[in-house]
Image (cartoon, rainbow, N blue to C red):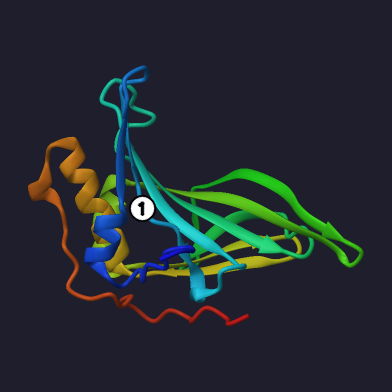
Amino acid sequence: MHGIAIIQPTDFTKVYEATKVSSDAHTGSTTVEGPTIFHDNHLLKNTYAVRSWINKNNSLLNDRFQVYVVGNFNEWAFLNQAYSNGQMLDTTLISRKVGHCSSSGCSVSETVGVNLSRERVKELAGTGLSFKIAGQRGDVTMLIPATYFGAIQKRHEEARGTPNEAVVPTTGKIQGDFPTAPRS
């Protein structure tokens, strides 16, 4: 089989199996990286993945999680702030890059991180998350099911030596009254 593996974020087992754990002997950190999800199954549009860090010697990194979002556009959107249910989320601009250019213009990608605590991810493993990253000329709306957060959180707890603290979701649906992501 060739090509890009498409993993459904609602499949707890597949997300769990595709989540990678790596250690860095130099920094003493362990990184947990979930699989990249092609939002709305569109290979050339927006993606997300969740990653976390474990480093008991660095309180800034220890038990930190980040939703890593890449938005692809035909012009700069200048993404800058994430929101969920009327609340601002802790947001980090990671990069802005120009991709392929042709006579009709250039493709651009903007990468933003939504920072989450271990406690918040435990909650999201039961509810999922709907959020929007707003920009000056565009935005990205994402829906991440509880199953995806649950698989990442389980791997994280195993890597830190506390597997009994994992929350295993019972559904891939997002709880609450959330708007659906627009289809492109």
Q: Quick one: which residue is furthest to the right in this view?
A: 103
Which quadrant would residue 101 be assigned to in this image? bottom right
Viewer-closest of 171 and 2: 2
- For residue 174, side relative to residue 2 (left or right): left
Tell me the crowding category of disc 1: few under 14, some 14 to 19, or many 20 or more residues within 10 angstroms, Cα based: many
- In-front residue for pair 124/24: 24
Is residue 142 visible from the viewing direction of this image? yes
Q: Is residue 162 above or below residue 38?
A: above
Element class at badge 1: loop
Indicate left or right for 59 with 138 as reference.
Answer: left
The reply to whether residue 87 is visible in this rendering is: no
Number of marks drawn: 1
Tag 1: amino acid: Gly
The quadrant in which the C terminus is found is bottom right
- Residue 143 location (% of width, % of height): 44, 71
Q: Position of residue 153 (x, y in %)?
A: 25, 52
Tell me where residue 108 appears, x and y as whole percent.
73, 56
Seen in the picture, residue 65 relative to 133 is either above or below; the reply is above
Residue at x-position 64% and y-position 44%? 95
Identify which residue is drawn at 24% across, 55% down.
Answer: 122
Q: Quadrant of residue 78?
A: bottom right
Residue beneath disc 1: 34
In the rendered view of the protein, which quadrant contains the N terminus?
bottom left
Q: Pinpoint residue 51: horizontal percent, then vertical percent.
A: 38, 46
Q: Nearer the viewer, residue 5 or 71?
A: 5
User: Of all residues shown, which one is farthest toward the top?
Assistant: 26
